[in-house]
Amino acid sequence: MTKTFLPEVSVVVPVYNGEMDLPELIECLRSQTYPSHSVEYLLVDNKSRDRTSTLLQTAASNPPSVPPLLRGGSKKGSNSQITIRNLTENQIQSSYAARNKGIRASIGEIIAFTDADCRPESDWLENLVKPFVDLEIGISAGEILALPGKTILEQHADRQNTLSQKHTLAHLFCPYGQTANLAVRRLVLQQIGLFRPYLTSGGDADLCWRILRETSYKMYFAESAIVRHRHRSTLKQLHSQWYRYGESNKYLHELHGVDLMREFTTGEYLYRLARWLLKELPIAAAKGAIARADLVDLFNTPIGLLNVRARAIGQRQAQLPQLAREIEQL
């Protein structure tokens, strides 16, 4: 990063029942290479029912010190501790409402986002902010990689790169970045507004689409700005994830007129299952016999079909609340 481009940055993180995640997240924030005097971390408790509030209060009142190796480039007299601000959004149960709370309280020229269950690499923020040296860039999207997983479901998602920004950046209607790893200029938010606070899914796409379709700003894929995220490890969690993807499809269709993703017919489901049973499974089993395949290879297709089914159900059942059409202003 050039020494002449170190804008003030605010990192906003919504937190819901983040007791187990906060210690590791805060350590990742402490280890960022971006100068600590130029960044604030706003952690927003969104109606948590565990010890999140207590942990955030402690972190804000006694923030961790910057590692010695990262102090060399700091401005003389600057803080040796990172700046953590503890906020609360108790009115609306929505990560987008919590992010809006953080945005309104922030002071940075650049607003960056990640989630409590993400683990940003040490140079994440530095690489995410670099593209903004180009004044035409309004959004910077970093890459999302998987944390190590042991279950078949986690390994399947890892093989499919389920969380990668490369999927959303290739969206046929309009590219977008996920808020697990995203940064936006404050000036852009002043122009097009904040997140829709009552939206429960698809808010990241909605924000990016409004920016890219209503302004002349461009989006940059900062592939070296990496956060790592856990994949879902149980069928319940996986169903919930893909159900929300379906809800997002429906909401974005109503808000932007995007065509819904076509659902599989019963015949297509049966064909894919038959193909798996008669062709894919025997091949994977044969490879496994000579140690060239594992369980995730055996169950790749049925897991994928479960995901498609959950998304279709979410898409059919979703009903966009009228309040979700509202856009808050900065």
Image (cartoon, rainbow, N blue to C red):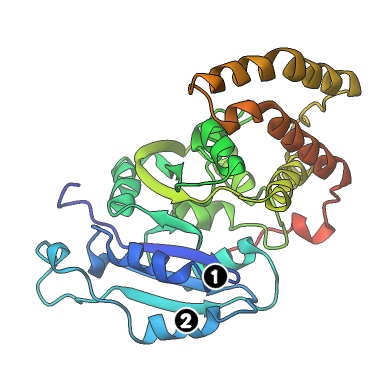
Left or right of 221 in this view: 91: right
Q: Residue furthest front?
A: 289
Whether label 1 touches label 2, CB < 8 Å: yes
Q: How far apart are labels 1 and 2 at the CA level?
A: 9 Å
**Residue 106 vs residue 239, the one in the foreground:** 239
Disc assigned to residue 94: none
Q: Position of residue 314 (x, y in %)?
A: 81, 44
Q: Quadrant of residue 316?
A: top right
Disc 2, SS: helix
* Residue 175 appears in the rendering: no
Is residue 284 or residue 55 the one in the foreground?
Answer: 284
**Count of numbered labels shown in the rendering:** 2
Q: Residue at x 55, y 64 (%)?
A: 99
Quadrant housing residue 143: top left
| Picture residue at 49% right of the left edge, 67% below the top | 21
Is 308 in front, or is 320?
308
Q: Is residue 84 above or below residue 250?
A: below
Which amino acid lies under the numbered mark 2 shown in the image of this protein? Leu
Q: Residue under label 2, please give it.
A: 55
Above or below, 5 relative to 298: below
Q: Position of residue 64 (x, y in %)?
A: 29, 77
Mark 1 is on which residue type?
Gly
Q: Identify the residue at image location x=63%, y=66%.
A: 97
Task: Tell me if I can see residue 211 in this picture.
Answer: yes
Under circle 1, the secondary element is: loop
- Left or right of 289, for residue 282: right
In the image, is 44 to the left or to the right of 249? left
Please, is residue 58 above or below residue 208 in the view? below
Vertical side of 181 occupied by 277: above or below: above
Residue 298 drawn at (x, y percent): 63, 27
User: Can you tell which mark lies on residue 18?
Assistant: 1
In the rendered image, residue 50, in percent from the top left (x then y), is placed at 60, 79
